[in-house]
Amino acid sequence: MAGICKAIIIGNLGADPEMRYSAAGRPFTRFRVACNRVSTAPDGERREETEWFGVTAFGKTAEICSQYLHKGSRVYVEGRLSSRSWDAADGQKRFSLDITANDVQILDARQRDGEFDAASVDDASDLDAIPF
């Protein structure tokens, strides 16, 4: 029986996404998402922690992310967890736990360059016009 390796996060992009192409010509887009968590310490002090996640999207999802997402965009990301390791320039072994996106949804209705993003459509009848 197969296992499940699934992640769901909601957060904000820390920078504009970067789209590239694989050697085979397949588009992929990488971006980082910050997820905040607020907790209260035993002494009553309120603490906010931020966890960063690397996200990679492929194919049509990558193209849509590159076109519609920007720094600060609020997104819902669902996908599988994947880990990787590498040797850094300082000789240290580094590890990363990233998300390979199956589904990315834009959650905010931010205005950019005088026009609204595609995710800001208010009329439900216009939802079919959104390309994702």
Image (cartoon, rainbow, N blue to C red):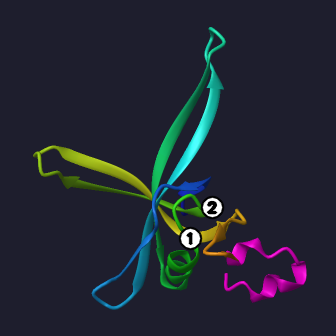
Q: Position of residue 17 (x, y in %)?
A: 45, 69
Q: Residue, x 10% and y 46% (percent of image)?
A: 91
**Magenta-colored span:** 116-132
Which numbered tag is attached to residue 77?
none
Q: Residue, x 47% and y 52% (percent of image)?
A: 53
Q: Position of residue 120 (x, y in %)?
A: 75, 72
Q: Position of residue 59 (x, y in %)?
A: 49, 84
Q: Residue, x 88% and y 78% (percent of image)?
A: 123
Mark 2 Cα shell of 10 Å, populated few (<14), some (14-19), many (≥20): some
Q: Which residue is mark 1?
A: 69
Point out the image quarter for the N terminus.
Answer: bottom right
Left or right: 95 in relation to 107? left
Q: Position of residue 29 (x, y in %)?
A: 44, 74
Q: Which residue is mark 2?
A: 75
Q: Would you place residue 88 above or below residue 47 in this image?
A: below
Q: Residue furthest bottom?
A: 25
